[in-house]
Amino acid sequence: MKKVLVVGGGGREHAICWKLAQSPKIDKLYCAPGNAGIASVAECVGISAEDVEGICAFAKEHAIDMAVIGPEVPLAMGIVDALEAEGIAAFGPNKKCAQLEASKSFTKAFLARHDIPTAKYSEYTDKAALEKAIGIYGYPMVIKADGLAAGKGVVLAQNAEEAQKAIDDMMGDKVFGSAGDLVVVEECLTGIEASMLCFVDEHTIVPMESAQDYKRIFDNDEGPNTGGMGSYSPSLVFTDEVKQQIWDRILAPTLKGFQEDGLDFKGVLFVGLMISKDGPKVIEFNNRFGDPECQSVLMRLDTDLYDIFDAVIHNKLAEQEIKWKDQRAVTIVLASEGYPGSYPKGRVITGLDAADGSEDLVIFHAGTKFDGDDIVTSGGRVLGASALGKDHDEARAKAYELAKKIHFDGAHFRNDIGLLHSTEKES
């Protein structure tokens, strides 16, 4: 029997813990730092996900058999390298590979080097030079802070005035800190945005079931970008033809590129895609489960997640059979008032028992904590109301029915998650 430590405390980590807790091979599951929902399936440990030294010390002291790293920041800090140096098996890419998310410039160069379809781009470290390039690819102008910015470092400027403000924010006022020291400008891709999560080891890449997420805060994809306001799986835009194109043009060349570049990637590769009139193109790579795609995808996983993680760590992914439920899944994110800007915390949440007793309903906690006997809000994205259904429409109806039973002051959610028209975007 195994001891497993999950690192992180958001909705993604709740979904991972929820799924791992179903494994008969795990007799003790920890999560650092966890949240109020994770506490129902794992023992929460008061260590920050970014406290690499503290995580390593805990893992050694408690003889952890496997550490699973959820968020991108500790991956970029090299937590996998640190754990492995202590003899702890860790699921997630090492620091070198984590650059695929930690640096947009690194990824764009990788894609160009291996002839993988993506948007045209230029990069700038000088603010004046960037200002001279305003409108270089027309509008909307895609402006990206190079480093990690919690999913908020991308601006689609509709005109020169908005572009100038984004440049002032990123390179002048440093609203994203050092992430804005280098800025990447891309041509704007049009089409339907989609996500493909993949399990990857040094020899094999295995796509998971497809998913779709919704980044903008308001219905009809209006308002600023967020970390994600909802998701569903499988994506309605993934035809067999599109899947084959993604494999031939993106996934197979990516694995080959990893091998040629000496990138010994092991973990989850998140491929953000635009399904354009010219076929699928890569918008971004992430090094971990997307959130909230993770919630919808793991609701449908029918294989022991521990076995998959173990296979990846030991480069035996090709030997691992991965099965999926035929049911569809939808996740609705309930957010705090003011998000993605500043928002209040500490608001009491009710209705959290609405999914109790159902195998098809789960409320994943993202930004919650205990306050005495109450569970209160502690983040911008607070909860994910997730549901399985025999078809897409049933899953969507059940997820919204569940979301409407949960209450806290200022709670809001999008009403169009799972509607195809809302996924037609520019990026």
Image (tube, rainbow, N blue to C red):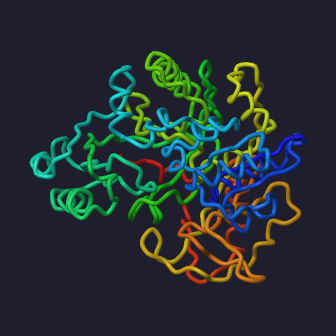
**Looking at this view, is 123 or 97 the one in front?**
97
Q: Quadrant of residue 289?
A: top right
Residue 293, image x and y in percent? 60, 48
Coordinates of residue 41 in the picture (x, y in percent): 81, 58
Report which quarter residue 2 is drawn in.
top right
Tell me what residue is drawn at x 29 percent, y 43 percent.
188
Horizontal and vertical percent for residue 301? 75, 40
In the rendered picture of this protein, how many numbered marks are placed on residues? 0
Q: Is residue 287 visible?
A: yes
Left/right placement of residue 73 relative to residue 206 reads: left
Instruction: Residue 228 in the image: state x and y as whole percent.
Output: 52, 57
The N terminus - image quarter = top right
217, 110: nearer the viewer? 110
Residue sitting at x 33%, y 46%? 146
Q: Residue at x 33, y 29 (%)?
A: 109
Residue 149, relative to residue 375: is it above or below?
Answer: above
In the figure, is residue 383 to the left or right of 259? right
Q: Between residue 262 and residue 231, name the one nearer to us.
A: 262
- What residue is rendered at 38% in x and 27% in y? 110
